[in-house]
């Protein structure tokens, strides 16, 4: 039987202790014949912001996509429903051959409890794009690490209302169609008055802190969620690192509100577990709710825990506006100098 052409073909390689395929898979990009996106609520429902969510659905569909929603998406609750039902709704989209991408509706705090019910084998056998941000890291991150399947971090399905649309929004939707644009740092970002009415106020000049010039494989997401999974049965980082050690890893972290002392301890834990064994650089987004200890700041936490790794801070990644989409598992060329930079993704196996 011939290999299905649903994704980039793989090269076969055997790594001692980690036998199997050395292959990052990239699902089919969406087009007019494959344009269905399935929205599901693995974390919070969107019942408290239906007008906003409808704006997002209209905006996404204006790009030629068709959206189907799982039953719990519009529930006014957090989480949207019990953990098993949420995963059952995910599985229905995974197994639906007409669905080319699965987009998580919103963030929240309870997606971690769904992990025991997720069928990673089904996800691997039915490759499609998975998109989300914040709490949905609890799906995207293990899918990329365990299934060798690229995922897209940065936007939830409900991120495209008047408030959420930013200069990277169109680029994310275009990427789903196969247009791979180089991403450049923003000129301005929102630093204060985050929850103002209407569109975000971009009132602060963007200046990345740090520099790097690297090529490697991207891996990351919401820092708090990755820390939650570290050391559990759903931590597949060691295997991922060994499979792609020849590429080297470029980590990206979106810190929501974790205290800077806790960030330092979490980094040490990850370091002791070998997370940063083959790391070439770390990209850190702007922290939304800063919780800085008098003892150590966020930048000091990284420099003290990982003194030999280049770290760039205050990037357009995460919960603040504007923010890029990041392709988990993809190769990337990252160039950052003098406060500005660019990221170019390469769909390399």
Image: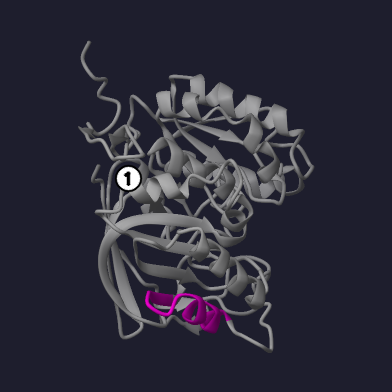
| Figure quadrant of the N terminus | top left
User: From the viewer's perspective, is residue 254 above or below residue 244?
Assistant: below
Q: Nearer the viewer, residue 308 or 40?
A: 308
User: From the viewer's perspective, is residue 22 above or below residue 238?
Assistant: above
Q: Which residues are magenta?
A: 298-312
Q: Nearer the viewer, residue 15 or 4?
A: 15
Q: Is residue 246 magenta?
A: no
Q: Is residue 245 visible?
A: yes
Percent from the top left, x then y, of residue 96?
A: 49, 20
Q: Nearer the viewer, residue 329 or 56?
A: 329
| Figure quadrant of the C terminus | top left
| Residue ranking furthest to the top | 1
Would you identify the image quadrant in which residue 70 lies? top right
Q: Is residue 288 visible?
A: no
Q: Residue at coordinates 41% horizontally, 68% vertically from top-left?
A: 282
Q: Residue at coordinates 30% horizontally, 69% vertically from top-left?
A: 342
Percent from the top left, x then y, of residue 259?
A: 67, 74
Decide: few, some or many residues near mark 1? Use Cα within 10 Å; few <14, some 14-19, many ≥20. Answer: many
| Residue ranking furthest to the front | 16
| Residue ranking furthest to the bottom | 294
Question: In the image, 210: left or right of 348?
Answer: right
Q: Nearer the viewer, residue 344 or 251?
A: 251
Q: How is the image coloured?
A: one colour
Dot 1 corresponds to which residue? 243
Q: Is residue 301 magenta?
A: yes
Percent from the top left, x then y, of residue 51?
A: 68, 47
Q: Which element is circle 1 on?
A: helix
Percent from the top left, x then y, of residue 117?
A: 64, 30
């Amino acid at each position: 039987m011939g290999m299905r052409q649903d994704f980039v073909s793989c090269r076969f390689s055997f790594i001692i202790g980690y036998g199997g395929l050395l292959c990052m898979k990239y699902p089919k990009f969406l087009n007019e014949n494959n344009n269905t996106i399935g929205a599901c609520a693995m974390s919070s429902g969107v019942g408290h912001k239906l007008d906003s969510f409808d704006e997002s659905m209209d905006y996404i569909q204006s790009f030629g996509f068709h959206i189907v929603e799982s039953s719990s998406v519009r529930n006014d609750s957090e989480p949207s429903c019990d953990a098993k039902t949420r995963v059952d709704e995910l599985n229905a989209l995974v197994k639906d051959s007409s669905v080319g991408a699965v987009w998580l509706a919103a963030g929240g705090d309870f997606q971690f409890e769904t992990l025991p019910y997720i069928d990673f084998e089904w996800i691997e056998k039915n490759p499609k794009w998975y998109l989300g941000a914040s709490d949905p890291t609890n799906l995207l991150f293990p899918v990329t690490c365990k299934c060798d399947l690229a995922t897209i971090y940065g936007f939830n399905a409900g991120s495209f209302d008047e408030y959420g649309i930013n200069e990277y929004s169109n680029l994310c939707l275009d990427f789903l169609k196969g247009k791979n644009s180089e991403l450049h740092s923003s000129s301005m970002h929102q630093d204060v008055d985050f929850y103002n009415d209407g569109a975000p106020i971009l009132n602060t000049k963007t200046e990345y802190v740090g520099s790097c010039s690297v090529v490697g494989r991207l891996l990351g997401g919401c820092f708090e969620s990755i820390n939650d999974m570290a050391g559990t049965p759903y931590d597949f980082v060691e295997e991922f690192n060994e499979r792609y050690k020849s590429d080297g890893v470029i980590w990206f972290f979106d810190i929501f509100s974790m205290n800077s002392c806790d960030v330092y301890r979490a980094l040490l834990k990850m370091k002791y577990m070998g997370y940063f064994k083959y790391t070439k650089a770390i990209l850190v987004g702007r922290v939304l709710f800063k919780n800085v200890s008098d003892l150590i700041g966020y930048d000091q936490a990284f420099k003290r825990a990982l003194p030999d790794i280049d770290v760039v801070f205050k990037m357009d990644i995460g919960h603040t506006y504007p923010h890029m989409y990041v392709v988990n598992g993809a190769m990337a060329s990252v160039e950052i100098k003098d406060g500005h930079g660019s990221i170019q993704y390469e769909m390399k196996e």
